[in-house]
Image (cartoon, rainbow, N blue to C red):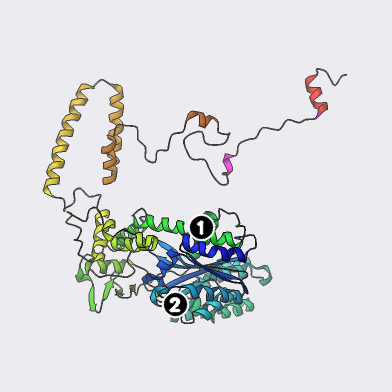
């Protein structure tokens, strides 16, 4: 196997551009593809890095470890390594090998990320601290309460069933405190509560977690987390690797595992990032629209205070609190934005003061072009390729020389206001042309209705068109109505038709229409009664075929 890896290394480099290196004792393989190299050079790679391991990917059960960073399009890998075990020595060997092949501009030209977000694995965390001592290690806020919940449900700890929920609620209050003072108060209440006093071993267990509170308590996290407190990106990557890359089948050996990583995994992430840069994923735009609705009570700069140095004071909806927004760091003093997550207060500052935020949703052409650079590299089209079609000739959208953040908000505002009657930025020429076409359409419709007044088919089609016209609420639906004429048989989400012979060949219990075949476990009420198997007992067959066989 080692000879085959040595033979494949030049082939992977020439065909895929992937750098693969290995060592024999302890066994470790480090993989760095071109997409991972380009992701390291991005600015967001210096903030937070997700690390997680998985096994059962090949016949020898080697350990596959992913290092990921978060982008506007989701998480992308920064490196992959394969080890023979989960010991600290194996992890140190793998991370050292991976560190040796990283580019000079690794982790956003810093050489290490600000935060490593991991599970509570001592071996993995020891190896990360050894290889990157300047980085801060934090625990996932999902796995820590999960570990406490499992401890409470363990029968050997003898926690009463009615007390488990109360103890867990007290621990969760500690986890989600936003200040160290509140966390200390919540801990004192939890460890001295009536329920906790009945279980001294739980108090010791809680004290053990409290000594490590800097690793998991929300009060000790900074804006460098960008609102990411769980290791879910790594968990999803592991699932995708097993489902899509390996198709839930183990690889033959490590050579096959490396080949799947440098070829199939690389193509998968390239396609996903390209879909985002081409505007086929609307999650960021929808997030911006939702925040715009929440910040609708802020309409002018007079409602906020400008402190200078890119710091602003933004009131809440009730006017009872004043939050401090820092556009340079991309954070807010509210609970949602204190760890670097983009909130409604930051959106209000971006909209009214035209301030640029490093954590703003990626809806501009420049942001989508940055994602495309990671996916395509030198083959990436220029920024003009990702410009909006409405950027020219639209008064509501700024010129190409305006800051990207301004266009980000203005484009989103236009999308959210499509349900209005007529946009103020529409020119007189377009209005005149629209009115002339509407008059011509009315004349033709009146003429045809008079000609086919007695036709029942036309009356039924016109009735359906009127019903469909009443249900239109967006410009895209109205355009679809005009393209289809409104009279053809139309249904939102219409399925692809299937040939009758194909439907007739389907086994009983499967849908008879044009719907897709159901996958997974069937629901409880949909099981089809199977026909009973005919018994092949010779005596019973003779008795059934010969009349009065029993009398003979």
- For residue 533: magenta? yes
First of labels 1, 2 by sequence position: 2
Closer to the eye: label 1 or 2: 2
Residue 175 in sight from this viewpoint: no
Residue 397 placement (x, y as % from top left): 20, 58
Q: Secondary structure at mark 2?
A: loop
Residue 408, quarter of picture: bottom left
Which residue is painted at 39% across and 65% down in the image? Answer: 71
Nearer to me, 453 or 375: 375
Residue 364 placement (x, y as % from top left): 29, 61
Q: Which stretch is magenta?
A: 524-537
Which residue is painted at 26% across and 69% down in the image? Answer: 349
Residue 255, quarter of picture: bottom right
The residue that disc 1 covers is 240
Residue 377 in sight from this viewpoint: yes
Picture layout, residue 200 above or below residue 417 = below
Q: Secondary structure at mark 1?
A: helix
Q: CA distance from mark 1 to mark 2?
A: 26 Å
- For residue 531: magenta? yes
Which residue is painted at 28% across and 26% down in the image? Answer: 459
Q: Could you tell me what secondary structure mostly forms the magenta stretch?
A: loop
The residue that disc 2 covers is 112
Q: Badges 1 and 2: C-beta atoms under 8 Å apart?
A: no
User: Badge 2, how many Cα within 10 Å: few under 14, some, many 20+?
Assistant: many
Nearer to me, 446 or 234: 234
């Amino acid at each position: 196997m080692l000879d085959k890896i040595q033979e494949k290394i030049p082939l992977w480099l020439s065909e895929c551009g992937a750098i693969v290196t290995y060592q024999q004792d302890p066994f470790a393989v480090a993989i760095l593809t071109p997409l991972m190299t380009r992701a390291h050079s991005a600015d967001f790679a210096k903030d937070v890095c997700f690390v997680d391991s998985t096994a059962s990917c090949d016949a020898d059960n080697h350990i596959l470890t992913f290092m990921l960073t978060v982008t506007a399009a989701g998480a992308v890998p920064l490196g992959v390594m394969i080890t023979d075990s989960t010991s600290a020595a194996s992890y140190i060997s793998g991370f050292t090998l991976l560190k040796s092949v990283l580019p000079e501009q690794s982790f956003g030209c810093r050489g290490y990320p600000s935060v490593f977000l991991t599970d509570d694995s001592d071996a993995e965390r020891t190896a990360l601290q050894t290889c990157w001592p300047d980085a801060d290690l934090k625990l996932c806020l999902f796995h820590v309460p999960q570990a406490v919940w499992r401890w409470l449900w363990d029968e050997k700890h003898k926690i009463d069933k009615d007390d488990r929920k109360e103890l867990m609620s007290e621990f969760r209050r500690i986890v989600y405190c936003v200040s160290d003072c509140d966390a200390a108060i919540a801990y004192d209440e939890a460890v001295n509560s009536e329920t906790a006093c009945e279980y001294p071993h739980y108090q010791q267990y809680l004290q053990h977690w409290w000594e490590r509170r800097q690793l998991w308590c929300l009060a000790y996290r900074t804006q460098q987390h960008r609102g990411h407190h769980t290791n879910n990106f790594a968990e999803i990557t592991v699932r995708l690797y097993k489902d899509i890359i390996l198709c839930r089948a183990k690889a033959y050996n490590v050579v096959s595992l490396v080949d799947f990583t440098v070829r199939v995994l690389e193509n998968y992430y390239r396609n996903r990032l390209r879909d985002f840069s081409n505007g086929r994923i609307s999650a960021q735009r929808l997030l911006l629209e939702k925040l715009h609705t929440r910040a609708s009570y802020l309409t002018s700069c007079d409602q906020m205070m400008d402190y200078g140095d890119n710091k602003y004071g933004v009131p809440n909806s009730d006017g009872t609190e004043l939050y401090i927004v820092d556009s340079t760091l991309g954070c807010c003093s509210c609970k949602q934005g204190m760890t670097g997550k983009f909130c409604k207060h930051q959106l209000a500052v971006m909209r009214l003061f035209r301030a640029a935020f490093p954590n703003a949703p990626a809806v501009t052409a420049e942001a989508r072009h940055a994602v495309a650079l990671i996916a395509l590299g030198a083959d990436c089209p220029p920024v003009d390729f990702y410009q909006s079609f409405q950027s020219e000739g639209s008064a509501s959208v700024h010129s190409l020389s305006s800051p990207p953040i301004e266009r980000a908000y203005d484009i989103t505002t236009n999308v959210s206001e499509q349900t209005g009657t007529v946009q103020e930025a529409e020119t007189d020429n377009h209005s005149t042309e629209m009115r002339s076409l509407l008059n011509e359409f009315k004349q033709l419709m009146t003429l045809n209705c008079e000609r086919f007044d007695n036709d029942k088919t036309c009356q039924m089609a016109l009735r359906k068109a009127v019903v469909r016209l009443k249900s239109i609420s967006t410009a895209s639906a109205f355009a679809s109505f005009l393209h289809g004429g409104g009279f053809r048989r139309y249904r939102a989400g219409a399925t692809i038709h299937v040939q009758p012979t194909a439907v007739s060949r389907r086994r009983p219990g499967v849908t008879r229409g044009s719907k897709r075949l159901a996958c997974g476990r069937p629901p409880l009420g949909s099981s089809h009664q199977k026909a009973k198997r005919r018994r092949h007992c010779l005596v019973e067959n003779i008795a059934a075929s010969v009349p009065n066989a029993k009398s003979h």
